[in-house]
Image (cartoon, rainbow, N blue to C red):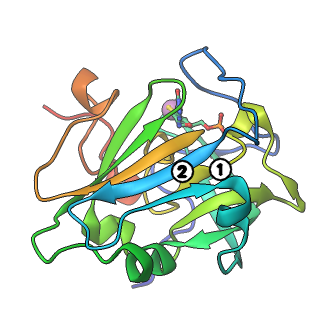
Amino acid sequence: MKRNRLPPGQRIVKNWPVLDLGTKPKLDLDKWALTIDGDVRKPVKWTWSQFLSQPHEEMISDIHCVTGWSRYDNRWVGIKASHIIETVKPLSKVKHCVFQSYDGYKTNISIKQFTESNVMLAFKWNGDLLSAGHGGPVRALLPSQYFWKSAKWIRKVEFSHADQLGYWELRGYHNNGNPWKEERYSN
Ligand SMILES: Nc1nc2c(c(=O)[nH]1)N[C@H]1C(S)=C(S)[C@@H](COP(=O)(O)O)O[C@H]1N2
Ligand SMILES: [Mo]
């Protein structure tokens, strides 16, 4: 499908704004862990070194924030969603995926959105480790959705047969968040 690179109602920025709930968690890499579980055959809980020992991929993608800014050509390194799926083996009843973060943030996506080929759990941006302000050590990255779906400081990825609304989804944001369809708010 050919589509405009800049979704409707967006403007390009060159900097990278920081947006979050204001409580930036202090994360010690020695104690950091990422749990991936729920309705899966092989749940995992990775330490930082176990996370880093998974296969990495580099990808370049654009960011589209619901507040109207878009940032082109971000170069990420992370673990692709397809590797996560192969590792934990979600059960066939799984339809949804929820990210839970160390600051208490939560956001939900469909399994279809998670399995898009541009989705990853990212730990590097433009050559450097992802900064704490932008969600380091590890954040979700879903370039085909508005950026609120890309949870920073992820602690847990939960696959489920049932949907669970996240922080912004409970406060009137759209459940899908497709920027080309301007799925900003639900009503
Ligand atoms: N853990 C966590 N992730 C989060 C948020 C948050 O408050 N906490 N805010 C979301 C929103 S609304 C946006 S626009 C992006 C901003 O990411 P950035 O600060 O790296 O630009 O993070 C998303 N992920
Ligand atoms: Mo946002």
Q: Amino acid at mark 2?
A: Leu
In whole angstroms, how far apart are the C-alphas of marks 2 and 1?
Answer: 9 Å
Q: Residue 4 vs residue 58: left or right?
A: left
Point 46% across, 73% down: residue:
84
Tag 2 and tag 1, C-beta contact below 8 Å: yes
Look at mark 1 in the image and give the residue it sits on.
138
The mark found on residue 34 in the picture is 2
Q: Residue 68 vs residue 126: left or right?
A: left
Point 50% across, 68% down: residue:
119
Rendered location of residue 160, percent (x, y): 19, 56
Q: Amino acid at mark 1?
A: Val
Q: Which of label 2 and label 1 is nearer to you?
A: 2
Q: Quadrant of residue 2?
A: bottom left
Q: In which quadrant of the rendered image does the N terminus lie?
A: bottom left
Mark 1 packing: few (<14 Cα in 10 Å), some, or many (20+)?
many
Q: Secondary structure at mark 1?
A: loop
Rendered location of residue 41, percent (x, y): 26, 73
Q: Secondary structure at mark 2?
A: strand
